[in-house]
């Protein structure tokens, strides 16, 4: 469901914001995952992967790590996040080095950036897919082992 707002002159207690006079109403929308706020194409896996970030403006690469990773993007934690729309060249260090052209889609000050992958070679995509499947299986087997205790 998407939430939209429309201005109402009359105020009531059924969802109207008393400060602005805007009412919130839900309308159907298409989302890829169960969470209605989640617009991702692929499931995320919470995994820390070393990453080197290069921008046009930076002279040397910035090193960091992912907080989560999917086939279509990742979240990188950093206290100095990039502005939305910044184009990045990423090098992910999984079993191999994966090169990705990406763009910043979210900016959380002093927290990090949401990154959307724009372009990568087919073999790099396959390497990420294999890595994510293995990481997800390891997490699933770890959670089953903990719940069996």
Image (spheres, rainbow, N blue to C red):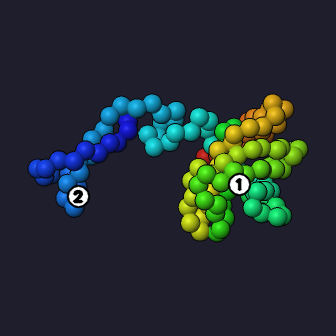
Q: Which of marks 1 and 2 is nearer the N terminus?
A: 2
Residue positioned most to the right: 96
Are there few (<14), some (14-19), or many (20+) residues within 10 Å of tag 2? few
Of residues 52 and 6, the one drawn nearer to the viewer in this rendering: 6
Spatial separation of the CA atoms under disc 1 and disc 2: 38 Å
Residue 101 x %, y %: 75, 44
Residue occupying the point 67% across, 64% down: 78
Helix, strand or loop for disc 2? loop
Q: Quadrant of the N terminus?
A: top left
Q: Is residue 55 left or right of residue 97?
A: left
Q: Which residue is drawn at 81% across and 30% down?
A: 122
Q: Is residue 100 visible?
A: yes
| Residues at discs 1 and 2 in contact (Cβ within 8 Å) | no
Q: Count how many numbered circles sit on residues in the image.
A: 2
Which sits in the foreground, 16 or 149?
A: 16
- Residue that badge 1 annotates: 66
Instruction: Give percent across and percent down for residue 144.
Output: 65, 42
Q: Which of marks 1 and 2 is in front?
A: 2
Vertical placement of residue 113 versus 23, above or below: below
Q: Name the residue under label 2.
A: 20
Looking at the picture, does residue 104 appear above or below residue 42? below
Residue 124 sits in quarter: top right
Residue drawn at 48 percent across, 33 percent down: 31
SS under mark 1: strand
User: Along the line of sight, which residue is nearer the eye, 31 or 107?
Assistant: 107
The answer to whether residue 69 is visible is no
Q: How crowded is mark 1: few (under 14 residues within 10 Å), some or many (20 or more)?
A: many
């Amino acid at each position: 469901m998407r939430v939209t707002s429309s201005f109402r002159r009359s105020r009531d207690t059924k969802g109207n914001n008393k400060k602005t006079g805007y009412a919130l109403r839900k309308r159907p929308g298409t989302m890829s995952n169960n969470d209605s706020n989640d617009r991702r194409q692929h499931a995320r896996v919470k995994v820390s992967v070393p990453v080197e970030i290069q921008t046009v403006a930076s002279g040397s690469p910035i090193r960091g790590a992912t907080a989560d990773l999917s086939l279509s993007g990742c979240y990188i934690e950093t206290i100095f996040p990039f502005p939305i729309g910044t184009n990045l060249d990423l090098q992910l260090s999984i079993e191999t080095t994966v090169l990705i052209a990406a763009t910043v889609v979210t900016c959380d000050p002093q927290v990090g950036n949401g990154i959307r992958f724009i372009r990568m070679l087919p073999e790099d995509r396959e390497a990420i897919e294999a890595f994510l499947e293995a990481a997800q299986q390891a997490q699933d087997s770890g959670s089953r082992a903990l719940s069996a205790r």
